[in-house]
Image: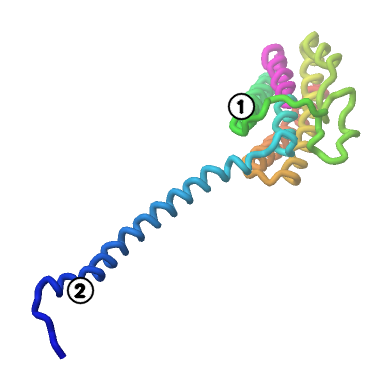
Amino acid sequence: MTVSTNPGAAADAAAPTETHRSRGPLWAALALILGVALGIGIGLSIPHFTKPGDDSVEAGFLRDMSTHHAQAVEMSMIAHQKSDDAEIVYVANDIALTQHGQIGYMQAWLRDWDLSPTSSQEPMAWMPNSAGSIVNGLMPGMATPEQLTKLRAASGKELNTEFLTLMRQHHLGGIHMAQEAVKLSDNKDVDWIAESMVKSQQTELGLIDDLLKKVQAS
């Protein structure tokens, strides 16, 4: 067997191996970069495809509950400004601040989803078999225009009684809507705020009932 001692021949023989070895890390780096880029692209696209749609349960609930809350804030501000009972003023202030803050969350999510804050659909369209819940265009628990007029004109014991009675009905309707949203929605943010509404309004119902008994007995 003849072994060449020519350095050039030895270099030529080794060249393919060195080229192969140098390409290995290069291809691995390119594959890693491509994988990361693909992962980022998928990650950015997933939220777009999973945003609730215009006719979704989530969008319908946030829109309707924003309207529902707005009336509670209005009634609470009337009681806060006109009531002569410090406890009622405190409860009214708490309801107004809490529900105004929740409106902020709900409207922000609708903007994030590129959806309008209002809808052309009928109120409660997001909830199955809800037709009976709408009375004269009003969602569950909402006060009529006549009741709001009476509340604005009232004072003293009449104001306190009227506010607590209307807010009690308002909370019962709101709790019902929020409980249905938790059942129907699969969005963690919507579930969180709906569950928060149920808990806070159930607690406030206990305070309202106690205050109503106190006012009626005075």
Direction from residue 62 to residue 16 in the image, left or right? left
Q: Tell me where residue 185 appears, x and y as whole percent.
A: 71, 44
Q: How many discs mark residues in the rendered view?
A: 2
Q: Quickly name the residue at label 1.
A: 104
User: With respect to residue 179, does 63 lie above or below?
Assistant: above
Q: Quickly name the residue at label 2.
A: 13
User: With respect to residue 14, does 214 lie above or below?
Assistant: above
Q: Residue at x 52, y 43 (%)?
A: 44
> Start and end of the magenta stretch?
68-84
Quarter occupied by residue 182: top right
Q: Tell me where residue 64 appears, x and y as whole percent.
A: 75, 29
Q: CA distance from mark 2 to mark 1?
A: 73 Å
- For mark 2, give the secondary structure: helix
Marks 2,1: beta carbons within 8 A: no
Whether residue 197 can be seen here: yes
Amino acid tagged 1: Gly
Looking at the image, which is closer to me, 78 or 116? 116
